[in-house]
Image: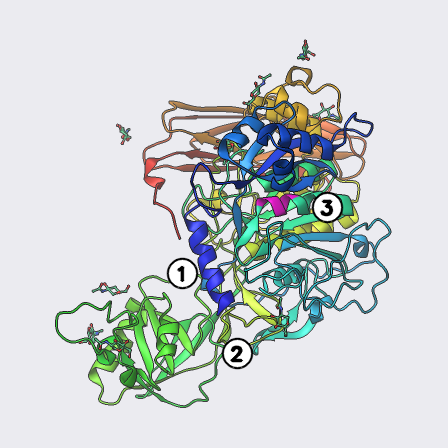
Amino acid sequence: MILYFAFASCFLCLATANCVGGSTENERKPYIVYMGEVPENGARISAMDEHHNLLLKAVGDEDLARESKIYSYRKSINGFAAWLLPDEAKRLSEEDGVASVFENTKRKLLTTRSWDFLGVTESSNNIHGSVESNIIVGLMDTGIWPESPSFNDAGYGPPPATWKGKCDKGANFTGCNNKVIGARYYHLEDFSGGPDEPTPVDTDGHGTHTASTAAGIPVKGSSLNGIAKGTARGGVPSARIAMYKVCWSEGCSDMDVLAAFDDAIADGVDLISLSLGGDSTGYFNDSVAIGAFHAMRKGILTSCAGGNGGPTLETVINVAPWILTVAASSIDRQFISTIKLGDGTITSGFGINTFSMKNKMYPFTDGAHATNVTGDFYYGNISACDSGTLDKDKVKGKIVYCLGVSGQDDSIRMLDGAGTIMAIDELTDHYSLALIPATVVVRSKNGDKLDRYINSTKNPEAVIYKTRTVHMDAPFVASFSSRGPQLTNRNILKPDVTAPGLNILGAYTQLTSITGDPTDRRYSAFNIMSGTSMSCPHASAAAAYVKSFHPDWSPAAIKSALMTTATPMKIKDEFEELSSGSGQINPTRAVNPGLIYDINESSYISFLCKEGYNRTTIGLLIRGKHKYNCSSFKPALGFDGLNYPSMHIHLSGTESRISAVFYRTVTNVGGENLEIKAKVTAPKELSIAVIPKTMKFKRKHQKKSFKVSVKGGSMKNGTDILSATLEWRSNKGHSVKSPIVVFKQHHRFDFGSFP
Ligand SMILES: *[C@@H]1O[C@H](CO)[C@@H](O)[C@H](O)[C@H]1NC(C)=O
Ligand SMILES: *[C@@H]1O[C@H](CO)[C@@H](O)[C@H](O)[C@H]1NC(C)=O
Ligand SMILES: *[C@@H]1O[C@H](CO)[C@@H](O)[C@H](O)[C@H]1NC(C)=O
Ligand SMILES: *[C@@H]1O[C@H](CO)[C@@H](O)[C@H](O)[C@H]1NC(C)=O
Ligand SMILES: *[C@@H]1O[C@H](CO)[C@@H](O)[C@H](O)[C@H]1NC(C)=O
Ligand SMILES: *[C@@H]1O[C@H](CO)[C@@H](O)[C@H](O)[C@H]1NC(C)=O
Ligand SMILES: *[C@@H]1O[C@H](CO)[C@@H](O)[C@H](O)[C@H]1NC(C)=O
Ligand SMILES: *[C@@H]1O[C@H](CO)[C@@H](O)[C@H](O)[C@H]1NC(C)=O
Ligand SMILES: *[C@@H]1O[C@H](CO)[C@@H](O)[C@H](O)[C@H]1NC(C)=O
């Protein structure tokens, strides 16, 4: 039971936002003291000594300073984690050399885990290659189960010569191979008393699943108990995997994430994939944004899950401009289970049922008929089958019809029921993986009919069949996928792209059951999971694929290639670009985008100056450079101040007119003599001018700048979003698209927070 309840407490804990320790003023809590970049070699004093001296100054006692330090970061990220009192943390934040001090928070995995539900994917792209086998994808996750058939290293040579990583030992971990070339764990707090053990092995399933989605080898005939049968394979099946285990039963600590970034950058990974996140605003008090910034400076792109806070607006996370932020969309299959009634009626429900009832009819009842509650006492909601309202004798061996999908399967199982049909008011795109034979119906569609059958029949009977796969129209953005606008910089569109994240078949660990429930006896080498956790490794793999063709491209160039070649959703959302960004990744097209919107390090710095970060902070970020003074950087031009591949105007709602100018520079990667022509598609409310409209590039890597001005009147009441597109079409057939989005803020978007 331990693992199961540990997860439950994790979600509770995260929901209350204060996970670490108590809240008294006198209690030491873990803080991260971020000091920017490690000083150049030859600095007078080592980073370790610098950390100790600072800590000593803050806590005032040599022994205490030594005891309170948890960790030093000193490879490329400079800083340390320590147990501090709030006033010590505050004092430290005022010290020279300190960029920021922030309390360690716990981030969570971005699966829809407790509502896990099932589906299938086969990667859309069929990719192989010997260059690809030199690519190393680094993942920060729950560890890895290397024995999975997805990580079989037959035919792989030794790790690339550039690899400097390690393979930690630990309980139930059989070790690395030539596929999984690195596996380390980070758990800077004490293990004692907790359910976790010091090992890089995956006892959760999430890390094995994401790693196989990014770089698993093709495994024919994979399925979850026969459902979603097909070939499971990663986006870059020849690439190598390096796992950094930072997530444990209680979440993923900032200080562990930062330590993993520091190592991954030094180890020589080509890309970093993170399917985790938490609430954060600001760039330098967020471990993921900080880690990704240092990775970017070393030419490594970080791809992150955009969060599962949808469909509410303003929920997107991991939004720093140097991160690729990934939404989740559907693939073209869904899962249906046939229901047959005693009178021969056939209907169907949604969600995955791995169980077979062997075509045998079971007695069928509902909460009202199976209750033991009499009189006026209130013991819960009878029709929702709340535990405590039902009589075990009336449930035993029966299929029970219940309103709602909030753990009814577990309640019915406890009373020895045979199965449950759960009814909801509105169809959504994902449902939990149930613990007993179960399916989900919509009340108005067939739910009420089922219940009327129970009410009007003497001996009602039913059977739920094992799930089958049916085709559906796709892609669309999953309901749970977080939406923009982002809260840190409202004028940069996030998420950037979307990738499949609904019902993804991937490798799974054998160290836990498919639901994570210890009483569940179903184990499987493959499982079906949903979440931006699942879409992120698809995008990471696509980025790795592009990098295998263009090893010299910067992180921003790779990101631009993925964004400008993405495909718009077939089924549109009301706030389309706030859901899917530039659209669904198309790795094959991204290899030859024609143009890229590149962003170098100094452009990010100018951007940060424009964002109001002063020379003290910026000086620390790039210590190695001598001139780190905002006025020595060319000021960031234009509305957003960054050469971003998409354009977003966020109106507070009080503006009388729309007016913004974006300055952009494109680099020719489409070969010699490339000619391009701008094509703007815009609604009548917007007038968009691109200057110049045509450009000619003689040489490869030549850069040309242009200006986009967007004008319009005040947005009509009732209009929240205006969507336009700039497309550069080349004489060689390239189409380089950027969404241009105007969004007007309304208070009515405050729907409250989702669970
Ligand atoms: C490792 O395996 C042993 C025996 O199978 C088990 O008792 C233990 O809980 C496992 N540890 C982990 C981390 O799964
Ligand atoms: C992080 O920084 C941002 C802006 O710099 C600020 O708004 C936010 O409150 C900070 N968050 C924390 C946890 O310190
Ligand atoms: C109804 O049955 C449940 C389960 O058998 C039991 O826990 C509960 O106490 C009973 N309630 C009443 C009112 O008898
Ligand atoms: C019981 O739960 C169902 C489903 O959530 C709901 O429609 C119904 O109104 C609830 N009944 C009561 C008495 O709360
Ligand atoms: C079936 O009967 C129960 C108990 O009388 C009642 O609560 C429920 O609403 C009925 N269902 C339908 C669809 O009429
Ligand atoms: C970085 O990019 C900016 C804008 O394109 C350019 O002006 C600058 O020269 C570049 N800096 C370096 C070091 O390449
Ligand atoms: C920069 O900002 C920090 C924190 O807001 C402040 O302590 C410092 O004095 C500022 N430095 C300059 C040069 O403005
Ligand atoms: C910052 O740079 C500007 C222009 O290069 C220079 O005039 C100014 O003195 C510099 N400030 C500092 C504190 O170095
Ligand atoms: C639009 O809505 C605002 C606030 O509800 C209102 O004050 C304004 O008069 C409306 N404008 C028009 C043109 O209807």
| Marks 1 and 3, the one that precedes in the sequence | 3
Amino acid beneath label 2:
Arg
- Callout 2: SS: loop
Q: Amino acid at mark 3?
A: Asp
Residue named by callout 3: 263
Confirm if mark 2 falls within 8 A of ligand 1: no
Q: Secondary structure at mark 3?
A: helix
- The image shows residue 202 at horizontal and vertical percentages of 63, 63
Q: Earlier in the sequence, mark 3 or mark 2?
A: 3
Residue 72 in picture, x, y percent from top left: 68, 40
* Quadrant of the picture in which ligand 3 is shown: bottom left
Instruction: Identify the residue at horizontal 44%, vertical 81% (top origin).
Output: 465
Q: Position of residue 554 (x, y in %)?
A: 73, 38
Q: Main secondary structure of the magenta part?
A: helix
The stretch drawn in magenta includes residue 324: no
As drawn, 753 above or below 486 = below
Residue 205 image-quadrant placement: bottom right
Q: Are marks 2 and 1 in contact (CB under 8 Å)?
A: no
* Nearest to N terminus: mark 2 or mark 1: 1
Q: Which residue is mark 1?
A: 428
Tag 1: amino acid? Thr
In the image, is 305 to the left or to the right of 587? left
Q: Is residue 136 above or below residue 466?
A: above
Distance CA(mark 3)–CA(mark 2)? 37 Å
Label at residue 521: 2
The magenta-colored residue range is 254-258
